[in-house]
Each structure stands twice: as C-alpha cells, then as structure tokens.
Amino acid sequence: CDAARITACTGIKVTESNTPHGGMVVDGTVTTYEFMAPYFAVNDEKADTLAVFEDGAIAVAQRGKSIYAATPNVPSALLRSIAERSGAFVYSQSNRVYTYPTEHYVGVYNATENTATIHLPTDGIYRDLIENGTYECQNGKLCLPPKPIRAYLLVKE
C-alpha cells in the first residue's frame, strides 16, 4: 500500500514516512500500536481531523463521507463518535460493555465489575433469556447489574 493509492481510494490526501508518529490520541487518551514502516498520516487541509498522533500528525480524518485511519485499529471511543456523527444508534457508551443487536434480541457482554447501562430504541420490559431475569428500559436506558455470568440475551416482552 502506498500514499498515492490511499489518496485515490479515499479522496483524502495521505503522506508516507519511515518515522513513527507515536500513539493515537483520542479524548486525551493515548493508544499505542505496534507496526512497522511505512507510517502514514493525513495531510489534507480540506479534511476534518478526528484524531491525531502524539507528534501532532493527523491519524484519522473525514472528508465528505470518506474516513481514513492511518492505523489498523481505532479506539472504541472514536468508533462510537464516528457512528454518532453518521446518525447511527449507539447502544453502549462504555468501551467495555459490548452489545450485539439483532432484529429480535440484544446480546450484551459486560466486561466490567459495574452496572452496565445500555441504550435501547424502545422502552419496556426486557427478559434475559440466559438467567430469566427481567429489566425495565425507561427513557431509552436499561441498567444491567453485575452478575457471575456477564452475558445477557435480552428480548422485549
């Protein structure tokens, strides 16, 4: 892969170097990546910056409907922000509460030791098919207390 091909595919001007830019900074948190040269960065004054590297180079940018990330992985907080900007419904604001929505169910895995709060498009009573408990969603929020089995499979009653 080279900068000219990336630019041609994304419409976002990208530069290439042999010097790393450091970790990606999103909301004051640095995420480091282990990869080898070449290193890429955005160099496009018409693109909106979404994240930078520690050296100030642009790591992630958007131009029109195209988004380019100069790293193979993007932090959860940034992915969530991109989804919200595009108008997608976001089920979890936590980096460690994972949701798996389908047409009929919402799977949840709480990788924390705390109560998980998720957002649902419809208020009402939801049954956990794993342990048969019920939970109420009010004003689009549903709270799931910690339990030994950290997984939930929720269906609206």
Image (cartoon, grey):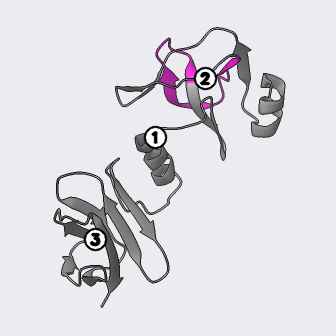
Looking at the image, which residue is at 76% across and 35% down? 11
Q: Amino acid at mark 1?
A: Leu
**Quarter of image, res 127:** bottom left
What is the C-alpha distance between the residues marked 1 and 2?
Answer: 20 Å
Can you name the residue that lies furthest to the top here? Answer: 19
**Residue 42, can we see it?**
no
Q: Which residue is mark 3?
A: 140
Of discs 3 and 2, which sits in the foreground?
A: 2
Q: Amino acid at mark 2?
A: Phe
Q: Is residue 125 left or right of residue 62?
A: left
Using a 10 Å C-alpha cutoff, classify the residue at mark 2 as few (fewer than 14 neighbours), some (14 to 19) or many (20 or more): few
Comes first in the chain, label 3 or label 2: 2
Q: Secondary structure at mark 3?
A: loop
Looking at the image, which residue is at 17% across and 59% down? 115
39 vs 9: above or below: above
Highlighted magenta segment, given as a residue range = 38-58
Residue 5 in the image: x percent, y percent? 83, 30
Q: Amino acid at mark 3?
A: Gly
Observer-nearest of 81 and 44: 81
